[in-house]
Image (cartoon, rainbow, N blue to C red):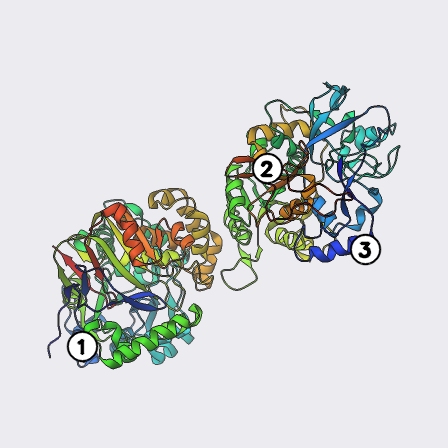
Amino acid sequence: MSTLLFERSLPRFAAARVASAFGSGKGAGVGPLRLVERDEPELPAPGWVHVDPLLSGICGSDLATLDGRSSHYFEDIVSFPFVPGHEVVGIVRDETPGAGGTALAAGSRVVLQPVLGCAARGIEPPCPACAAGQVGNCGRVAFGHLRPGLQTGFCAETGGGWSSSGLVAHSSQLYAVPDALSDADAVTVEPTACAVHAVLGAPIEHGDVVAVLGAGTLGLLVTAALSHLSVAGRCATPSAVLVGARYAHQQRLARELGAGEALPSDQLARAVRRRSHSLSYGGSPGTTTTLSGGADVVLDCVGSPESIAQALAMVRPRGTVSLVGMPGKVTVDLAPLWHREVRLAGAYAYGIEPERDVHPAVPTFSLAFEVAAAQRTGRLVSATYPLTRFEDAVAHAGAAGRRGAVKIAFDVRHPGLGTERHGGQRRAGRRPAGPNERPARTSTQRGKGPAR
Amino acid sequence: MSRRPGFVLEVDRSTPPTLVWRGEGFGLETLPTGSRVIYAPEPVQPLEDPYAAIRHALLHPLGDRDPLPALLRPGMKLTVCFDDVSLPLPPMEAPDVRQMVIETVLDMAAEAGVDDVLLVAALALHRRMTEDELRHALGDRVYDAFAPNGLLTQHDAEDPDNLLFIGETAQGEEVEINKRAATSDLLVYVNINLVAMDGGHKSVATGLASYRSLRHHHNPHTMRHSKSFMDQPSSELHSSNWRMGRLIAESGVKVFQIETTLNNDTFPSGFGFLQKREWEWSVRDRAKYLATSATLGKTPPRLARQVLHSLRSPHALTSVQAGEVEAVHARTLEHVWAQQGVDVEGQTDILTMGLPYICPYNVNSIMNPILVACLGLGYFFNMYRGKPLVREGGVVVMWHPTRPEFHPGHHPSYIDFYEQVLPETVDPSRMHKEFEESFATDPWYVHLYRTGHAYHGVHPFYMWYWCAHALAHVGRVIVVGGDPRAVRRLGFSPASSLDDALEIASDVVGPSPTLTHVHNPPLFMSDVR
């Protein structure tokens, strides 16, 4: 059974970092990720079950890890070697209670909530965050009967979604997938939950101007979540949702998902200025640099030094910048943050979303399923690859925007198969030529596109 | 040799290729046999002694006005307003006609002992002029006498302390103009009538007005029903201005209107071939054409723009008349038509036009895509009397690179209009309803208009409304050689060559259309029968 394994190897880590200088995802072939044959992981404790992945997405945090650009902060809360893949829709092998006690029959389709909190780690009593349902803020992710790992996909004992030999999951991590959702919809539920949590965690008020920086998977899902949740009354309704999207297909999708305006990133500040009736100063006359007012809330779905600086330049005094995209070590001028008393907040993972008006408190994942169903977020899955073509898959994910794609995923349903969507058409792939090798670093088929 | 009138050439096999402007460059195009090419009349002979003619006009006013010296007295408040940088095109060689007229007016005021004199550039919602532009328009002598003392100002349509509400016309149009001008004992307006649209009551009612007032005639409804706004009696735009102008007069504002006309001697001698008929090009003209077009073709657009905007036109004064507004303007229009009128028989299926590097709103600036549309559909399309050159449902073909480039200092709201409005709609009525007010009242645009050199926030809307009549009239607009994305953003069709454009046009006008090309500039007006 094929598994993509990420091992601790400083030379390979360095090679990946060098290669990624030529573009995100370029380092997969020389980095610490290898395709190996591996048995299924063992169940670590009672309450755990095997899950066979169907689709497993490639996330921005995965790319950062493969590129060797991930923050050193995470070193102590991951354990090696690990199998990446935390965006997972799969099949549970045995009957088990799911999250919230819902019974899951053997063979049920499930989405993984990957955070390895106190319940998964067998820690009793749970930490205050887990006790409050805020599993994303768990303070015990390096403790308990599991080795360190903030999520499945970063823990040596659980396996991950990038494997056809399956992974193990605690029953508290599993959510049943409604029949109406396709596998593609379901594999986007985890990042959608991140988006939902970010939106509901941001102090958005009725009539606010909200700017979304970036329109990759996370930016588009934030847009989708904001649109759906405001209509549903789960959050306030902004007067304008402005999305900075570099590529034309991203702009189109952002509009489809509810953006009031979706424009090139370098135009976003101008749009925010106009919507917020601000003045602008700095730069030559007529150019927009620092706004006197600005957006009430900026959701930065990129997390780069440039995007953070851009966010600080377009948020209003006493406004909020929410870092939704995973940042690393960045150098940013914080003078505007200080001078304008801007709140800079992180938005990570999920938990329980608090009650609002007539709406009771609810797990983030429950809302994410709603958003995925209402917005058909599976449309963002642009291509899937077999594990054997992991180098192509990662390269595609690293250049997704430039190549007209959004979400790239591994198709683990039929090893060796992949699909690609073009204009809504989904084409079955064919098995790439040649057998997998062991170790299978040498991908059996190289090419720019996914398997066809 | 007497000057030759404009005429309509029918293209046959012996007709040489036609010169066509393409923004900051030009080239030769072979038009289909049977096409018509309309050439402007040759330049009218200029007045031999402009200063004497100006003095004569001021001393012998038209209509119910006394000679200017009789209106001047010590202790009075005199305001002299003048057209801004948008006229003439290209900017004329020094001395500018405004300088000649204003020097004469000021000499008379000095002789009469008038001390309280203020000069006002009648910007309406245009950008403020730079010192160089003001010096060029007024001359160093006037500039140095007035500017250092704060007596040379530029109308500020957003200055509540210097606007005066005059009242409403019978149609409910609010009239609000420059307070200093309105409260002066005498308002002298110095105009340049480059085209028939300029002048008359439009000078004061538009040039010195506020947005509150301008919006009553600068809107899609008025523009669509101005057929054309180069023909005052058929222009809703002018009807509204005339109502406002009469209200201003009735309110007691005494306007002494001075209108001037220029000949269409447009290009300096080095570029003289640009206004000649191609079959009359000498060997030297051909050599100049080859050298110039090749050089411009290889020159980066930014540099080519600088070169072309540095050109000064040898325009010369052909008439000057002064006195009461309507009497003056009627005489002015006679002179404009004498210079620019061309009789044309019948309409055409396809109207083609090369668009040059300059229009009224990008002097020393960039011709952005919105201004491209405005020059082609707002100006050249509307240069008619009677009926449009192109038939209803016909096609307009324009040559221009239509790069999505903007001058951020001059056209900041244009950038946002292009990025935020045009992707939503190209319908003038819809953008008027949904977007205009937010742009018009945007504090940043207001700030840049008042303190920088920016056109008012609402100005790109006006430029688009300028196209409203053409947009409602024609079936398709095709831009040859334009940036495809920018052209599509405007709602037009891009084509890489005239042949491609004709192929595209055939969907609208059939396979054997008639074609008429306007050989602009020099400018002319078609009297279409």
Q: Residue B191 lies in what quarter of the image?
A: bottom left
Chain name for mark 3 = A
Disc 1 designates what residue? B46
Q: Is residue B222 visible?
A: no
Disc 3 designates what residue? A11
Describe residue A400's horizontal placement relative to residue B307 as left or right: right
Q: Residue at x 22, y 51 (%)?
A: B243
Image depth: mark 1 or mark 3 in front: 3
Q: Quadrant of the C terminus of chain B?
A: bottom left
In terms of depth relative to the viewer, which is nearer, A39 or B257? A39
Describe residue B147's horizontal placement relative to residue A232 as left or right: left
Indicate the secondary structure of the residue bearing disc 2. loop
Q: Is residue A27 visible?
A: yes
Residue A159 picture location, percent across and down: 79, 35
Disc 2 designates what residue? A429
Image depth: mark 2 or mark 1 in front: 2
Residue A407 picture location, percent across and down: 61, 41
Q: Amino acid at mark 2?
A: Gly
